[in-house]
Amino acid sequence: MAERGKDSLAFGPMRPVGLIDPRTSKRPYAVVQLRQDNLAGDLYNLVGFQTNLKYPEQKRVLRLIPGLENAEFIRYGQMHRNTFIASPKLLKPTLQFHSRDDLFFAGQITGVEGYMGNIATGLLAGVNAARLHKNQKPFDLPQTTMLGGLCHYVTHANLKDFQPMKANFGILPPIENADHLGKRERAKAYADRAIIDLENFLTQHE
């Protein structure tokens, strides 16, 4: 089991970028991240272990992990289920309910995935609720920004195929003439465009 590095939370156990196995000096295929779950330090959570395996099989497989051969398993894993509303039918890009402007939704219930996306939609819903209270128009952020792109996706996706979505460049309008750009250059182009468009948007809505 590789040691946990500073990038483990950014990339996760199935993409251990920045982690090197000290025994082989290579990046491991996957890692197990243990998160302390009590003050005594004798209860840990195996992060990201969603599974449909039966409990006896989980017990067998998990004991194959170095260091967990004699662990006591208090609770076994289960498959995480997302519950979310039909946002394309029910919500505006401002995160307001279609038939009731003073009712806002945010976070995972809207179909947004990821900690930052959930936090960001909560912030936007709060800002828009405050703006509505002050008789100001709620923000409908530019689709070229990541938060605007997420809100646009969950409120405009095909309802028949609607599934939760996390922040990614695929939900943003494409960058023109970007075929010649490398991955990092393309990401920077998306970010630069988003900053410019957001600054212009905020200037127009001061």
Image (cartoon, rainbow, N blue to C red):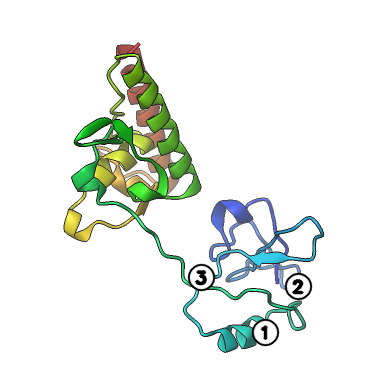
Above or below — where is 134 with respect to 44?
Answer: above
- Name the quadrant containing residue 31: bottom right
- Residue at 32% across, 24% down: 197
Camera-side residue: 21 or 91? 91
- Name the quadrant containing residue 97: top left
- Residue at 63% across, 84% down: 59
- Count of marks overlaid on the render: 3
Above or below — where is 154 with respect to 205?
Answer: below
Residue type of the residue flagged with mark 1: Leu
Q: Give the number of the disc on residue 23.
A: 2
Gap in Å between the C-alphas at discs 1 and 2? 18 Å
Please rate how many residues cluster around mark 3, counting C-alpha atoms within 10 Å: few if below 14, some from 14 to 19, many from 20.
few
Q: Earlier in the sequence, mark 1 or mark 2?
A: 2
For disc 3, the marked residue is 50
State whether residue 156 appears in this view: no
Answer left or right for 184 relative to 202. right
Q: Earlier in the sequence, mark 3 or mark 1?
A: 3
Could you say whether the residue bearing mark 2 is in a helix, strand or loop? loop
For disc 1, the marked residue is 64
Could you say whether the residue bearing mark 3 is in a helix, strand or loop? loop
> Which image quarter is the N terminus in?
bottom right
Report if the CB atoms under discs 1 and 2 are less than 8 Å apart.
Answer: no
Residue type of the residue flagged with mark 2: Arg
Q: Position of residue 61 (x, y in %)?
A: 61, 85
- Residue at 35% across, 52% down: 165
Could you say whether the residue bearing mark 1 is in a helix, strand or loop? loop
Report if the CB atoms under discs 3 and 1 are less than 8 Å apart.
Answer: no
Answer left or right for 134 relative to 69. left
Above or below — where is 27 with respect to 57?
Answer: above
